[in-house]
Structure formats: C-alpha cells, structure tokens
Amino acid sequence: MKHLFILFCTMFLGHISMAQSLDGAWTMVESDRKGYQVEHTLIFTGGYFSEAIFEKSNGKFLATKGGSYTSDGENLNLTYEYASNDSGIVGKTKIEPYTLNGENLALGKLNWTKIDNGTPGDLFGAWLISGRKRDGEIQMRDTSGPRKTMKILSGTRFQWIAYNTETKQFMGTGGGTYTTINGKYTENIGFFSRDDSRVGASLQFNYEVKDGDWHHSGLSSKGDPIYEVWSKRLE
C-alpha cells in the first residue's frame, strides 16, 4: 500500500509539473542605479518570446530582445533574432536553466511572476506583417526575408518589433496591454521606443481572423487609415 501511495504521488506531481506552461506573459520589477523602478515584461507564445524593459512610472523604453526558443523542461534554448542594446547576440543561442512553480518562474538568475496564461487569447501568438491593402486591393508580401515586423501577443499583453536578422539592426518597438471585444482590437500603449509621448494612448481597430490570417484595420497612431494582414508564425 505504501508503494502504491508513493507511485500515485509521483504520477500526480509529475502531471502537475507537465501541465504548467510558459505560455503567456510574465513580469518582474527591479530598481536601477538611480533608484527608478524598471519593469520587465516577458511574453512566451509556444515557440517565440520577447522581453521588453521600460521605466515603470512613465513607460520610457530602455531595451528589448527576443526570438525563438525550445525547452527540454529544465533549460530554455533562447535563439535571438533581435536585441536593441546588444546586436552581438543576434543569431546566437543562449541556454538558461529554469523552474516553474505555479505563478512563479525562475529563469537564470531572475524571478518572474505570471501576468496571464495566454487567455482569452483570440490573437495569442507571434505574427508577421504579410500584407497591406492599397488602392482597394490587398497586396501580400513574403515573410521569409531577413527584414521583419513581428507582433507577439499573450492573452493581455502585446509587443511589436521591427528588425533585420541579416544586418542585426533593430528599428523600433512598442507595446502594452490589449483587448479583443466584439470585433474590436484595442491597444493601450505602455512603451514606445520612437516616441515616449504616445505612452498612455489607446488605439482601437477592427479585427477579424480569416483563413488563419489576422486582418487589422483602422487609424494608425499618426491618424492615417491602415489595413494590414498578419500571418501567424509557425514553430
């Protein structure tokens, strides 16, 4: 009976461990040398990740890095496609040990708290800009080239990043929180590398997923009409 109990506990705990997932958004806050509170937001979408770093009080952008990842349950293999503050790591893979314990993630020397688990998740995933409507017609583009604009979304957080994997150039990013309600996609800007004054603004768009692609229309942050098509990245 004792052996059966131990076996049951082992199987039960193993099931819980496997049920835990990195998918979603994570956060941590630290103080910099000047005493400012710096927030880190980390999004995992099943095969891609992005970390954004900004000042908590005003959204001042500090850095971002990300790319693709794989996991063996004990280590993450992080392959960088972009890094705003260190282009030397682009194209390289870093192995980081990690442990998951409920809503807590220990990754390397950092400890993270889960914000969401990827739900509600209408647009959960990593997407690449793949088309735009011009003169009433949708013009598609190849997403396999080195120059990319990616948007990565958890259940409640988003980040877009423009970069070039060949030149290792980082061209811009922005992010914050979002909602998808009744066909309306609303972004609440929490940081924006190109213009800090946009922090705090909310932008609403129409959205629809057609044949697996995300169709996105409305007015840009500059007030210009846009119609974009985004295609999901596959692992």
Image (spheres, rainbow, N blue to C red):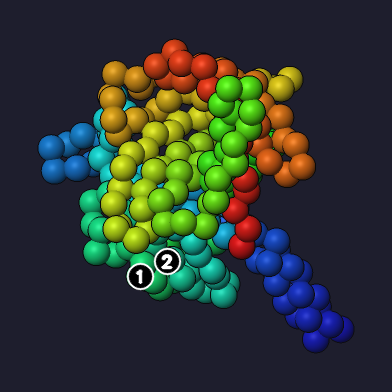
The residue tagged with tag 2: helix, strand or loop? strand
Cα separation, mark 1 vs mark 2, equals 6 Å
In the rendered view, would you say 11 is above or below 142? below
- The quarter holding residue 36 reads top left
Residue 207 is situated, as x and y percent measured from the top left of the image, at: 66, 26
The residue tagged with tag 1: helix, strand or loop? loop
On the picture, is 153 further left or further right than 65? Answer: right
Residue closest to the eye, 68 or 211: 211
Task: Determine which residue is flagged by label 1.
Answer: 92
Residue at the spot 25% in from the left edge and 40% down from the top edge = 62
Tell me the quarter of the image containing the C terminus: bottom right
On the picture, is 223 further left or further right than 214? Answer: left
Residue at the spot 73% in from the left edge and 44% down from the top edge = 212
Task: Determine which residue is flagged by label 2.
Answer: 79
Residue 141 is situated, as x and y percent measured from the top left of the image, at: 55, 45
Residue closest to the eye, 189 or 150: 150
Residue at the spot 57% in from the left edge and 75% down from the top edge = 72
Given the image, on which type of amino acid does mark 1 rest? Lys
Q: Are marks 1 and 2 in contact (CB under 8 Å)?
A: yes
On the picture, is 169 further left or further right than 68? Answer: left
Estimate how packed mark 2 is, as few (under 14), some (14 to 19) or many (20 or more) residues with alpha carbons within 10 Å. many
- The quarter holding residue 100 reads bottom right
